[in-house]
Amino acid sequence: MTFFYIKALHIIFVVAWFAGLFYMPRLLIYFTEAADQPEPARQILQTQLAIMQRRLWYGITWPGAVLTLILGLSTWYQYGSTPDWLIYKLILVAGLYGYHIVCHLMFRQQQRGELRYTSTQLRIWNEVATLFLVSIVFLVVVKDALSMLWGLVGLVAFAALLMVGIRIYKRVREK
């Protein structure tokens, strides 16, 4: 019975973590685009966005990531075995934590006022969390390596569609 409560909490904190991973790149984009605004709007926007970034990152995203890890490891321990699909999931989750760390570095740069990426680059980066989410959910639900292979093919196609969508959106915005 405890297993299901821990698993439910794990899923809840995964959702909270992803909420932060989806919203933080958007805030990074807005912060970058605010740099193109004339003063005093630039300063006002960037100050407010920096506050929002800090609250999101330290109040939702990091706690969600840490509790996801703790509860996920607990669930894995209680599961009692490591099937193939779980190994693949753990590899994807490790990649997701890598994405999280890179987002943290970008967040820290912007908090120092360093703008190293264009808003278009950040829009592309924003879609990486979606790719991880789709991969992990399909793998957990289907639990089959061959299906995972087809899922990865679909994921590449999905990523290509996202890139096309980003380019179209960029053209529409520039007009």
Image (tube, grey):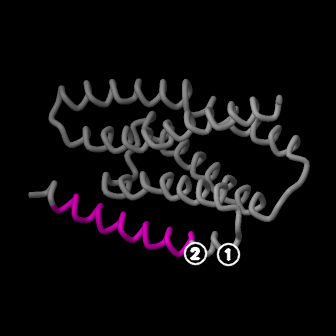
Residue highlighted by disc 1: 146
Q: Residue furthest left?
A: 175
Q: Residues within 10 Å of mark 1 (few under 14, many from 20)?
A: few
> x, y percentage for residue 81?
89, 53
Left or right relative to 30: residue 61 = right
Left or right relative to 100: residue 56 = left
> x, y percentage for residue 83?
83, 60
Query: Does the magenta portion include 83?
Result: no
Measured Cα–Cα span from mark 1 to mark 2: 7 Å
Left or right relative to 27: residue 16 = right
Query: Does the magenta portion include 168?
Result: yes
Q: Residues within 10 Å of mark 2 (few under 14, many from 20)?
A: few
- Above or below: residue 4 compared with residue 101: above
The answer to which quarter of the image holds residue 52 is: top left
Q: What stretch is highlighted in magenta?
A: 151-171
Q: Are marks 1 and 2 in contact (CB under 8 Å)?
A: yes
The answer to which quarter of the image holds residue 22 is: top left
- Name the residue: 76% across, 34% down: 4
In this rendered view, identify the residue nearer to me: 89 or 138. Answer: 138
Residue highlighted by disc 2: 150
- Above or below: residue 155 compared with residue 68: below
- Name the residue: 65% across, 61% down: 142
Q: Which residue lies furthest to the right in this view?
A: 80
